[in-house]
Amino acid sequence: MNQLNNKDIVELGSGDCSKISILLNSIPKHNLDSINYIPVDVSYSALQGSSEELLVLFPELSINAIIADFVNQLNVIPDNRECMFVFLGSTLGNFTEDIANKFLTELSSKMNQGDMFLLGVDLLKPLHILHNAYNDSQNITSDFNKNILNVINDIIDSDFNINDFEHKAFFNEQKSRIEMHLVAKRDLIIMSPFINSEIHLKKGENIHTENSYKFSHEQIKNFEEISGLKIKETYTDANNWFALVLFEKFNN
Ligand SMILES: C[S@@+](CC[C@H](N)C(=O)[O-])C[C@H]1O[C@@H](n2cnc3c(N)ncnc32)[C@H](O)[C@@H]1O
């Protein structure tokens, strides 16, 4: 990974930084002090916790965390050094097509000649694998899905009770996406001091909580056209379930 020497690594939606550690581990220790790592996330606690952990693992690294929204605030990211942007965990798959296209276009116009973009995407795969991943026996996805109600309660002081809802996740073939919903188990009335009227939910009614688009290699190739970036390498696992795509910026 000598190509990262003297570069900024900007990770968009860095979260717990667990994936970037794998990349940083592949860089010889004596080269790490030439790299400036810039995690970008909306979560202050994620940035603080992960930066502290990374500095223990990689004391040579310089870290400049930025709290920002990567959809609307790419302009706050410095662009005075050569850079590799990193966007992992198929977070792109949580965007609608319009936002994904806008994001790719704006990121590309921010990039300078020779800059790179490493994108992690979840590929289309057999239906039962997708279904089981989002309906796991340990209820990890179900708990994650229901937790959005706790987050909403914290923000608007509402009285959602997660036990009143059932997790529902399925693959929408037409839209090439996993959809997650929460289904009311009974008629419900939800209140919050921040909204004027009560929220009425009938038994069986859905709250659509998340989409996670799954991509084909053809769609990934199409990102070249949308962004103007060129694919340099595509790495996949043995099953061809996930891809890491390395794009490069060439000025016309
Ligand atoms: C699904 S997690 C992925 C974390 C990490 N990239 C990984 O693959 O393990 C998405 C991360 O992006 C952050 N995030 C989501 N939307 C964002 C936005 N618009 N701007 C900045 N960060 C965002 C979340 O706070 C979260 O840490």
Image: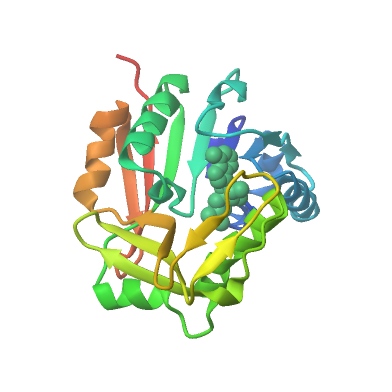
Instruction: Identify the residue at image location x=47%, y=63%.
Output: 201
- The relative height of residue 59 versus residue 102 in the rendered view (above or below) is below
Give the residue furthest to the front: 197
- Residue 60, horizontal then vertical, whole percent: 77, 43
Quadrant that contains the C terminus: top left
Q: Is residue 31 left or right of residue 131?
A: right
Compared to 73, does 126 lie above or below? below
**Residue 30 placement, left or right of 93:** right
**Residue 34 image offset from top left, x and y in percent:** 68, 33
In this rendering, position of residue 199 left or right of residue 104 = right
Q: Quadrant of residue 179?
A: bottom left
Residue in the image at 46% along x and 23% along y: 111
Inspect this view and state whether residue 32 appears.
yes
Q: Position of residue 218 (x, y in %)?
A: 19, 47
| Colour convention of the picture | rainbow
- In the picture, residue 109 is in which quadrant? top left
- Which of these two is toward me, 88 or 167? 167
Picture coordinates of residue 3, whole percent (x, y): 51, 37
Q: Is residue 12 visible?
A: no
Q: Is residue 5 left or right of residue 107?
A: right
Q: Is residue 77 above or below residue 52?
A: above
Direction top: furthest residue: 252
What residue lies at 44% left-to-right and 42% top-to-bottom?
118
